[in-house]
Amino acid sequence: MSKNLVIVESPSKTKPIEKYLGSDYKVLSSKGHVRDLSTKGKYGLGVDIENDFKPDYITMKGKKSVIDELKKESKKVDHVYLATDPDREGEAISWHLQKVLGLTDKDYDRVVFNEITKNAVVEAFKHSRKIDKNLVNSQETRRILDRIIGFRLSRLIQSKTDGSSAGRVQSVALKLIVDREREIMAFKPEEYWTIDAIFPEFTASLFNYNHKDFKIHNEIEANEVLNNLSNAFKIESVDKKTKQKQSKPPYTTSTMQQDASNKLGFNARKTMQIAQKLYEGIELESETVGLITYMRTDSIRLSNEFISDTYKYIEAKYGKEYIGSVKVSKKTENVQDAHEGIRPTSINRTPSDVKPFLTNDEYKLYKMIYFRALASLMKSATTINTTVVLDNSNYQFKATGQIIDFDGYLKVYKDYEDTKDTILPPLENYKSDVLVSTDITKEQHFTNPPARYTEAKLIKEMEELGIGRPSTYATTMDIIKKRGYANIVEKKFVPTKTGFEITDKLQEFFSHLINVEYTANMENDLDKIADGNIDYVKVLREFYDEFEPSVKNAFEAMPKKEAEKTGEDCPECGSPLVIRKGKYGEFTACSNYPKCKYIKQEKKEVTVICDCPKCDGKIVEKRSKRGKIFYGCNNYPKCKEAYWDKPIGKKCPECGSMLTEKKNIIKCSSCDYKSDID
């Protein structure tokens, strides 16, 4: 019997970790969260506002059996190790497990590892600790804030608009999308023209007149310039500079999501799902091993061991001259440096080595992560940049070129960067000489409005503004799309009518709370709670005392949106019929509700399957409340004949009941009779 019980979040982690630790350890999974806030108390928040925001936790649906098993196993062992994910959320899950299992401080230890490899896991158990209550307080505060804002604002929005929800981060992200769309709507394009001189080996563009900035606003001005030009261009200067092109640091959650969107076409949700699988473990030839470090991080730090191994790898494979320096983060605000940047768990496990064991999408993401981490420790590339300035009748034209002199990190990263050479002829040898163009062209242009947000651009903007956390970006994107607040058109967010409406209403009543600065400051407060520098109850109280009066005012002052009239009158009371929204979509009902409860029954196309065997009705295709297809009599409720599998209108040769079809198998709806379809 094992002496120790280890509890992780994901079931896929249990086998490799158990193998790493040996027979004295049994590893089980909590399968994620086990408790959440109830919906009891004031406004159904599950939080006692008056009693220092004390949360009321309940066991999550489907988790009773998991908890019962963990309780049973925890009583059989000498010690319990809580090894949930290495972030604030993981810390909170460990705390919930400690509480539901009734573990005292002497009964348990908290273990944190950033990668699922034998060395990392074994080493982590040498440095176990107790649960960090400051981290738990920070996560609890975030959860309580999101519950209060989400519940209170969502109910307001549902009662006053066509929307269905609002949230602390979600509504600010939606505001960014709406504000950008309004910029686009207000944008007035301006005309401008460019003039290019064409030479046999390169093209030069007009940029100055008398060495001052020069713009051409219309075709008349363009023609005037052309009339002043000849085909003879004097070489005014040739400037050659050597520049260093540095590699980028290892991925954070945000930069990984952005690059996966731009380079691989993955949305944020898909990227995180694949990264989770790569982190939790892939079955290779002889073992299951995590291929990357923990994928929820905003740090670019790398372990000394990985740096040392990678330097050896670079020297052996590419040469000592390719070894670079370690990247250091310049950004300190809002960075949780609890663990590393995203990197491969071993630099010697190359993408080509593991490709046979990965799906195509897993391989693409692993390859991108691997080469980003490798390139971050390689020498800068050296480029020779040449700028040539030509003069023609006091109009200056410019041509630029670039040659890679030393490829450096581009040796491994060229597939992810546009690094083509642009070669100019050796014009420095012809200074003061005259070049003759083959043609001089003019072209009309118009200024473009600001671009709509792609997922990658919105994630980048949210990160730079300090809104939310990278681990929540995927969920935020999903909610905005699923709630119908924005559509994706050509991979860009376009706000809907409802998205505009909700943003405008929230800004009218909550502009002091639903804005970038307030949301970013709240993230800073959550960081201070995690560091033990501020009391979480104080943060919650200050927030609530400002928020709740605004909500009450909005419930009173915000006008309720009038329901859209259909142009028909109610057949029961004569009031106008209107379109309302319900749990299962839109429906037509009387505007005089609740006095009149008339609902128009929409005529739907009915798919008749066969005759009903119990009455003179027809068996037709129907849908359950949850949307699942079944087959029932159209005389319901008088006749309750129904089937989950599709009936074929024939009787069972053994019992006479209806025969049904599923996956090319004929089955009786009552007895065990089966037959293949002929």
Image (cartoon, rainbow, N blue to C red):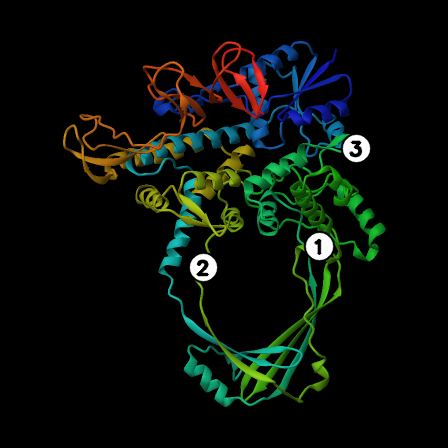
* Residue at point 63%, 82% (across, down): 199
Q: Which residue is mark 1?
A: 413
Left or right of 518 in this view: 206: right
Tell which tag, 1 or 3, sits nearer the viewer: 3
N-terminal-most mark, 3 or 2: 3
Question: What x and y, as percent, mark residue 81?
Answer: 67, 20
Left or right of 607 in this view: 276: right
- Residue that extends furthest to the right in the rendered view of this protein: 316
- Amino acid type shown at disc 1: Tyr
- Amino acid type shown at disc 2: Pro
Q: Is residue 169 visible?
A: no
- Label 1 with label 3: CB-CB less than 8 Å: no
Any mark on residue 450, and which? 2
- Residue that extends furthest to the left in the rendered view of this protein: 574
Res 283 → quadrant: top right
- Helix, strand or loop for disc 3: loop
Any mark on residue 285, and which? 3
* C-alpha gap between disc 1 and disc 2: 30 Å
Left or right of 580 in this view: 134: right
Question: What x and y, as percent, mark residue 365?
Answer: 66, 44
Res 572 → quadrant: top left
* Residue at point 25%, 30% (across, down): 600
- Amino acid type shown at disc 3: Glu
